[in-house]
Amino acid sequence: MPSFETLLYAVEDGVATITLNRPDKLNAFNTQMMKDLIAAFDETDGDDNVRAVIVTGAGRAFCAGADLSAGGATFDYDKRSAEDNDARTRDGVQRDGGGLLTLRIFDSLKPVISACNGAAVGVGVTMQLAMDIRLASDTARYGFVFARRGINPEACSSWFLPRLVGMQTALEWCYTGRIFPAQEAAERGLVRSVHAPDDLLPAARAIAREIADNTAPVSVAITRQLLWRMAGASHPMEAHKADSRGIQARGRAADAREGVTSFLEKRPPNYPDKVSADLPDIWPHWTAPTFS
């Protein structure tokens, strides 16, 4: 089991739980947490025993946003250490650390569930936008506070947020930078459901169990790619091409035989295919855009 400086990581019965673990700092996001989270998603993708991922926070916050210990220089790349800048540099270009994380989550091969247990501000909320299913404690609070800190939204949130809640709500939240409660987040579509604090993780685990116990992991990985990648497609033909290739590949696979047979025999399925070895390439023309 891997260990991380800023996270707790555990796998139980096919469900990985990643816990942001800087409770004395309200789990504030720093370069080490960025590196740890990216590495944790590398771990979940590479482990065929992991069927779903839950992300939550230790203590009373999910993530209170960027670590502001550098004061007014917090967001000034020129004032950061060489180590911090190196961690955010790709091909010689300085990149937004929250964006590097959300792009990694976007590419996850496993479904990702956020269990927001408390304050989720700045990158604490934008990192959740790339997760698939968002649950909140009734003590959770959200804030897209960037304009109140003199910066702009980050972590690819200008792509994710309007797709989740609509342009009007996205603009209101980002223009005002106000903190709003979990109930408003649910009413406007940011979160699926709101739970009492003690019920939050059990509710997240129940969804993860529904996935882990009943679905083929390779099919889930393809489904995740289809829905996220097609969110920006120019025409439904792009989806038709990809899902046609997927149906052809999966239809001849052992999982499809097991899915039908187990259904007809009225027994739980035992899917043999593995994401690490049996994920078909249904994207012959897909190339991830480059940063330029």
Image: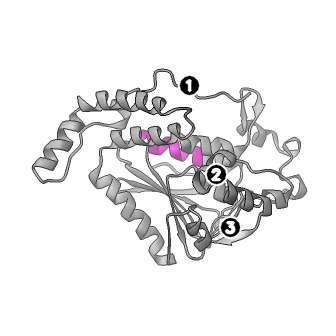
Numbered disc total: 3
Instruction: Where is residue 55? Give x, y as percent.
Output: 52, 58
Place residue 179 in its image quadrant: bottom right
Colour setting: one colour
Q: Which badge, 1 or 3, is on the more N-terminal residue? A: 3
| Residue 168: % across, % down | 69, 57
Place residue 16 in its image quadrant: bottom left
In the image, which disc is placed on residue 287? 1
**What distance separates the C-alpha of mark 2 from that of mark 3?**
27 Å
Eye-nearest disc, 2 or 3: 2
Mark 2: amino acid = Pro
Gap in angstroms between the C-alphas marked 1 and 3: 37 Å
Residue span colored magenta: 37-46
Would you name the residue on which mark 3 appears? 26
* Residue 13 in view: no
Number of the front mark, 2 or 1: 2
Inspect the magenta stretch and tell me whether residue 40 lies in it. Answer: yes
Name the side, left or right, on which 83 lies relative to 126: right
Determine contact: label 1, label 3, CB under 8 Å: no
